[in-house]
Amino acid sequence: MGPPSHTAPPFVRLAAHPLRWQMLTELARSDLRVRELASLLAQPQNLVSYHLRLLRDGGLVTVTRSSFDGRDSYYHLDLDSCAHALAGTGTALHPALQLGGPPPAPPVQPPRTVLFVCTGNSARSPIAEAQLRRHTAGHVQVTSAGTRPRAQLHPHAVRVLRDHAGVDVADRRPRHLDTLTGHRFDYVITLCDKAREVCPDFGNPAGQLHWSIPDPAAAGTRDDYPAFLQVAADIDTRVRHLLPVLATEPEETTP
């Protein structure tokens, strides 16, 4: 071992601040807007914005413009960056403290139930459904639906799942969210900013999460397959980090 450093690693300096730690824990659960964070933390919005900028500059948080309201932005905790930063933090203290990746989710009884929602149920939510089913080998009951489903899956969504996940969804058809009325899910995850605004309550508000993911078909061109590759990779990362959450008791709320 070399001589010890007396300067705390960047992750420690960023995360050790009480308010920033609260912000990280909220964003670890769901993508949020500034005003939502300010409300959850009971802090002035300008103060929250200041600390969000520090977290963005430190590479722990990213931001995307809302596809529902272009004046809004959603903040997202980059869990891969946090994992790398934590690994580096442990190694800075002692080489034996290097951390590994997130553990896979063990089977849980009864199986967790997860619903993914977007607008068309033609790209983002079926990709998420297929990825979670693949990673959990059937140990999670997962489905997806759309608030305004399209007639069929986008061919690029079918292609990206076949070529990069080994999953064939060619025969699947989009489902309307209304067909699931009366069902209850441990987790309802919206992947579309527009769908988030109209998604009904499925009986467990604590299990309603949001992933702000842009529509890869928004450009409406034939050469937008790279956008599907990027979205599928983002969804796969988020799904992998969801697995340990699904291995724990789901959050419940009292009516």
Image (cartoon, helix red, strand yellow):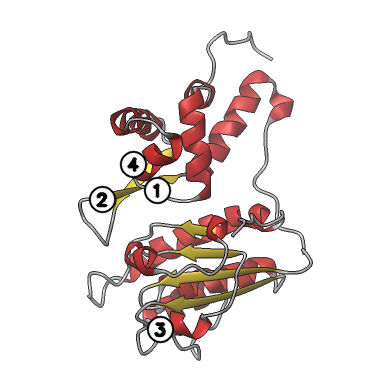
Q: Mark 4 is on which residue type?
A: Val
CA distance separating discs 3 and 1:
28 Å
Where is mark 4, residue-wise? 34
Please report whichever mark, 3 or 1, sits nearer to the chain's N-terminal start.
1
Outermost residue to the front: 255
Instruction: Tell me the residue that label 2 is attached to.
Output: 72
Give the numbered dot on residue 153.
3
Q: Which of 5 and 28 is in front in this view?
A: 28
The x and y percentages for residue 176 are 43, 84
Disc 3 and disc 1 in contact, CB within 8 angstroms: no
> Which residue sits at x=30%, y=72%?
217
User: Contact, CB < 8 Å: mark 4 with mark 1?
Assistant: yes
The span from disc 2 to disc 3 (Cα, nearest Å) is 28 Å
Quadrant location, the C terminus: bottom right
Check residue 32 in the rendering and tell me which mark sits there, or answer none: 1
Badges 2 and 3: C-beta atoms under 8 Å apart? no
Name the residue at 42% across, 70% down. 124
Q: Distance between the residues labelled 3 and 4?
A: 33 Å
Circles 4 and 2: CB atoms closer than 8 Å: no
Amino acid under label 1? Leu
For mark 2, give the secondary structure.
Answer: loop
Q: Which amino acid does label 3 sit on?
A: Leu
Cα separation between marks 2 and 1 = 10 Å
Label 4 – label 2 distance at C-alpha: 9 Å
- Label count reads 4
Asked if residue 27 lies left or right of residue 45, the reply is right
Closer to the N terminus: mark 2 or mark 3?
A: 2
| Label 4 to label 1: alpha-carbon separation | 7 Å
